[in-house]
Image: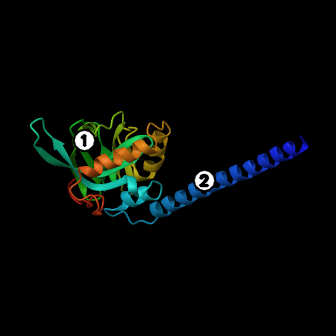
Amino acid sequence: MQNLIKFLIGLSIVTAVLLALVIIAVLIHYFRTRAKAEQLLQSGKRDGSFVYELLKTSFPSGRLFRQVLLPDIQPDGTAKRIPCDLLLVDQGGVFVIRVKNLSGAVDNADKQVWTVKNQNGILEMRNPFEQNLYGVKALETILKREGVYNVPLYNLVVFSGKKVVFRVRSEKLLTAERLIETIRDMNRNKFLNAGEMAATVNAIRRYLPNPNKAKPADPAPQQQA
C-alpha cells in the first residue's frame, strides 16, 4: 500500500512538472510570436507582402494562402477565376482577407463607393467587402463540391497603412494592428479540429492553378484601388 501511495505521489509530481513545462512552452511561443508581430508593425516596411508576413508570425504558413485565384463555378460547369488576396484556415473557420495598402481617412458610410483621403488626395474605390464577397462565394462552392461542410467563412477587409481612420467602425473592417487579435478572438469558438482544417486546406489546394507558387499579398496602389 505504501509503495502504491509513493508511486501515485511520484506520478502526480511528474504530471505537474510536465504540465508546468507545457504551460511555459505555450507562453514562450505566445510572447515570441507577439514580439515578432510587434517588430514587423514597427519596422515601417509595409509593402505588398506586409500583411502576409504579419500573419505568418502567428499562424502556420501551411494554412495560409496569398494571391490565390479561386474558380467561380457556374451551374453549367464553366468557371472564371476570382482573385483573393489572402486565405487563412484556422480553428475558427476560413478567413477571406481583402488587403488595401492604403493610409488615410476612410469614408465607408456609402455601401457602394468608399473614399480614402490622404496625402495623395481623395481616392475612390468600390466597397471592398462587396469585392471580397465573390471570393467568399467561390470558396463556399468549392467546399460543398469537395464534401467539406459546416466551415464558417469570414469576409475581412484590412487597410495596412500606418495611419488609418474609419468613419464607420466594423468588427470585420480592420487595421493591420488589429488583425491578429481579431482573428484570435474569432478562433476562440474552435469550430474546426485538426482533421477538418486539413480537409479544408486540401479542398482549397485542389482548385488552385499553381498552389505552390508564393506571391506577395497585393501590390501597393498609389492613386487608385
The amino acid at mark 2 is Val
Question: Seen in the image, is 1 located left or right of residue 95?
Answer: right
Is any atom of residue 158 visible in this view? no
Measured from the top left, where is residue 104 in percent x and y? 33, 52
In terms of image quadrants, where is residue 220? bottom left
Mark in front: 1 vs 2 = 1
Point out the residue furthest to the right here.
Answer: 2
**To which residue does mark 2 refer?**
26
* 48 or 141, nearer to the observer: 141
Q: Residue at x 40, y 45 (%)?
A: 197
Task: Specify few, some or many for label 1: CA neighbours under 10 Å numbering under 14, 14-19, or 20 or more.
Answer: many
Q: Residue at x 37, y 58 (%)?
A: 52
Task: Specify few, some or many for label 2: CA neighbours under 10 Å numbering under 14, 14-19, or 20 or more.
Answer: few
The Cα–Cα distance between marks 1 and 2, rounded to whole angstroms, is: 35 Å
In this view, 130 is above or below 221? above
* 207 or 156, nearer to the observer: 207
Q: Residue at x 13, y 38 (%)?
A: 74
Which label sits on residue 142? 1
Measured from the top left, where is residue 66 in percent x and y? 30, 56
* 51 or 147, nearer to the observer: 147
- Tell whether label 2 touches label 1 (CB within 8 Å): no
Which label sits on residue 37? none
Q: Disc 2 on helix, strand or loop?
A: helix
The amino acid at mark 1 is Ile
Q: Quadrant of the N terminus?
A: top right
Measured from the top left, where is residue 166 in percent x and y? 36, 44
Q: Disc 1 on helix, strand or loop?
A: helix
In terms of image quadrants, where is residue 25? bottom right
* 209 or 69, nearer to the observer: 209
Q: Residue at x 48, y 47 (%)?
A: 181
In this view, 143 is above or below 105? above
Labels 1 and 2: the sequence-earlier one: 2
